[in-house]
Amino acid sequence: MFLGSASVSFDEDIFIQGYASVVGKKEGEGPLGNLFGEVVTDPMFGGDSWEDAESQLQMKLVTAAIKDSGLKDSDIRYIFAGDLLGQLIATSFGVKNFNIPLFGLYGACSTMGEALSLGSVSLAAGCAEHVLCMTSSHFGGAEKTFRFPLDYGSQRKFSATWTVTGGGAVVLGTAGGFAKITGITTGRIVDYGYKDKENMGACMAPAAADTILRNLEDFNIAPDSYDRIITGDLGLIGQRILLDLLEEKGYSISNLHMDCGIEIFDGHTQDTHAGASGCGCSASVLCSLILKNIRDGIWKKVLFVPTGALFSPVSSNEGDSIPGIAHAVVIESECR
Amino acid sequence: MFLGSASVSFDEDIFIQGYASVVGKKEGEGPLGNLFGEVVTDPMFGGDSWEDAESQLQMKLVTAAIKDSGLKDSDIRYIFAGDLLGQLIATSFGVKNFNIPLFGLYGACSTMGEALSLGSVSLAAGCAEHVLCMTSSHFGGAEKTFRFPLDYGSQRKFSATWTVTGGGAVVLGTAGGFAKITGITTGRIVDYGYKDKENMGACMAPAAADTILRNLEDFNIAPDSYDRIITGDLGLIGQRILLDLLEEKGYSISNLHMDCGIEIFDGHTQDTHAGASGCGCSASVLCSLILKNIRDGIWKKVLFVPTGALFSPVSSNEGDSIPGIAHAVVIESECR
C-alpha cells in the first residue's frame, strides 16, 4: 500500500459490484434523465414529510443497489451513509429496517466520497466482503433545513445552486466487478473565510483544489492521467474558482474537468442558476453517467471528488464562515 | 482476522497511544472530577457562543491527546470525529486549524465507539500509523439544539438526563502503547418505537442490548470474559432495561455493568435525575476513569459500548420514534 501525504493506493482489490440511482421529477427532466435507475415523480416519495420522503428514497437505493450487485441484504456487512439533515434522520429512518450495521457519516455534499473511502478502507482491512456506500439529498428537506420554507417563495441569487432530490448507492466488494477503487485522497477542512450561503461553490472550490492538488502530488502524476476529474457540486462559479486556483499552482485541468452540479440540470431551461448541489448530486451522477461510462469502457480512470460546504444555519447566523471539504476517490475501469 | 456476524477481531496491533479529557465545571465537581485532564470553569470556554465553546473544547482535546501520545500534529494521518450539533459544526470549527484530513462521523452519543472502530479499521488496513478519534458535547449547545433555550428554565422529567459538557480524544497507532483495541462490534439501528425524548435511556437500551448480545455471541464468550461491560449514557432507567433485556436472553451482566452516564455525576447532590448523556459523556469517562484503570492494570479487558439515541427535534416533532444505535469496542490492557 502506498501512502502519500493524504492519499492511499490500495494493493487489495476493491471492486464496484453494483450501484443504483434514484432521483426526483426535475432531475428526471434534466440532461441525464434517462440514465438514472429510477425517476420518482411524487416529491413526497409516498412519505408524509420531506424528511420521510428522503428516507423512502434511501430505502429504494439500498434495495436497488443490492439487487444490482446480485447479493442479498444479509451479504452486506456495513452501510456507510449519511445525508444533510440534522442528526442524519434521512439515513436513520432510511436504513433501519435493513438490520445492517451502520456507520453514520457527515461530510456535507462530500459524503459520497467519504462513504466510498471508508467502505474501501474496511474492505482493504479485511473487515468485510461487501459494503454499501450511500448518500442522498432532497430539495424540500434541504430548503427547510438551510434556507426558507418553500411557501415563502424566496428569490434566489444567480450564484445559488439547486439542491438535488436524489441519491446514489454503491456496493463495494472484494470478489469482482466492472470497476475498482484504487486509491483515495482524504480531505482536510479548507476555509477561505467566505460567508455567502448563496454561493456555496465559492466556499467549496478551495477545498476541491486542495484535495485535487494533494492527489496529483501524492501520486506524482499529471492531471491527464485521468480521463476526467469530476467534482461534486461546485456549479459554474465554483468551477471557475477551482480552475483558477489550480492554474495558479501550475495545473491546467480545464479540458478534463467535469462538475456533477453543472451536468445534472440544464441551467438555461431549468432555472437552476449556478448549478446543482446536495449530497445526492454527485452520488446520483456517479451512479448514472459516471459509472455507466466506466462500465462501458469510455473512461478508464477518473478522479471523483465530491465537495462539501460545511454550512449550518446556526454557525452562519452567528457570523461564521462556511468551510469546505472534499474527498477524492480514484475509480478505474476493469474493461480492457 | 476473525469476522462474526457484526464483529471483527483484529490480528493487527492497534494501540492506544495517548488520550485526553476536557470537561466543564459541573463535571469537574462530580465523582470523577479529579480524574479529568482539564476542568474548564468558563462555560463558554473563551468562545462567544455555545457552539464556539464546544469547538474550543475540541481544540483543547486534539492538542492534549497528541501531546499525551508524544507525537506532533503532522504525525496524525486522520481525525475521526463528530458531535451532536447539526452539520457537526463543533467539529468543523474545532479541527479545521489542525490541517489534518477529517472523516466526519455522526452516531449520536455512540460517536466515540464509531470513531474508535473506524480509526482501528484504518490502522488495520495499513492506511495510517496514527489516527485521532474524538467526540464532544456541550450542555448549552445540546439544550439549544434539542430542547429549549436555557433562559426558559424548563422543568425536566426525572427520566431525563443531563448533557455532559466535555469530551475525549484518543490517539491510536501501530507502534506501541499501554492498551490495545482488539475487536469491534458495529451497531445496527434498533427501534422499539419509543418516543419520549425525556427518556433517552429507554430509547437506547435495546440497541445496547443488541450490540452486547452480538458481541458475546460472535466471540462465543461469557460476559465475565470482560472485567467491565461499560455503556455510554443509558442512565438509571436505561440500565435497568438493558439488564432486563439481556437477562431475558440468558445473560446476567449486573455484576460487571457500568454506565458512564451514571458514574460522571452524583445524582443526589447534582440534580441530574436519571444520569448524564451526550457524546462527551462516554468519551470523557473513557479518557479518564476507564483508560486510567486499564493503564494501571486494574482492568485487563473491557467492552466499551457508547450508546446513541438517533433523536432529532424535526423527526420527533413529526411524530417519529427515537431509534438507538450502539458501537462496541474491546479494549485490553497491555500491562501483564
Image (cartoon, coloured by chain):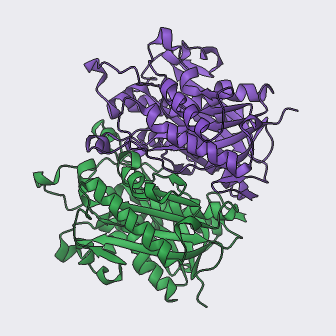
Chain colours: A green, B purple
Residue A278 visible? The answer is no
Quarter of the image holding residue A216?
bottom right
- Residue at point 23%, 78% (across, down): A29
User: Residue B15's quadrant in the figure?
Assistant: top right
Expressed as whole percent of the image width and height from the top left, the position of residue A157 reads: 19, 58
B139 lies left or right of A222: left
Horizontal arrangement in the rendering, residue A270 relative to residue A40 (left or right): left
Q: Nearer the viewer, residue A175 or B23?
A: A175
Q: Position of residue A173 (x, y in %)?
A: 61, 71
The residue at 41%/41% (across/down) is B89
Residue at 53% across / 53% down in the picture? Answer: A103
Is residue B143 among what the camera can see?
Answer: yes
The quadrant in which the C terminus of chain A is found is bottom right
User: Residue B212, how many percent across, how many down?
Assistant: 62, 42
Furthest residue in direction right, as rendered: B336
Q: Nearer the viewer, residue B307 or A22?
A: B307
- In the image, farthest residue toward the bottom: A336
Residue A132 percent across, percent down from the top left: 52, 65
Is A141 situated above or below B302? below
Foreground pick, B25 / B289 = B289
Q: Quadrant of the N terminus of chain A?
A: bottom right
In the displayed structure image, the side of residue B261 where residue A166 appears, left or right: left
Badge count: 0
**Outermost top residue:** B269
Seen in the picture, residue B208 relative to A178 is either above or below; the reply is above
Q: Residue at x 37, y 78 (%)?
A: A37
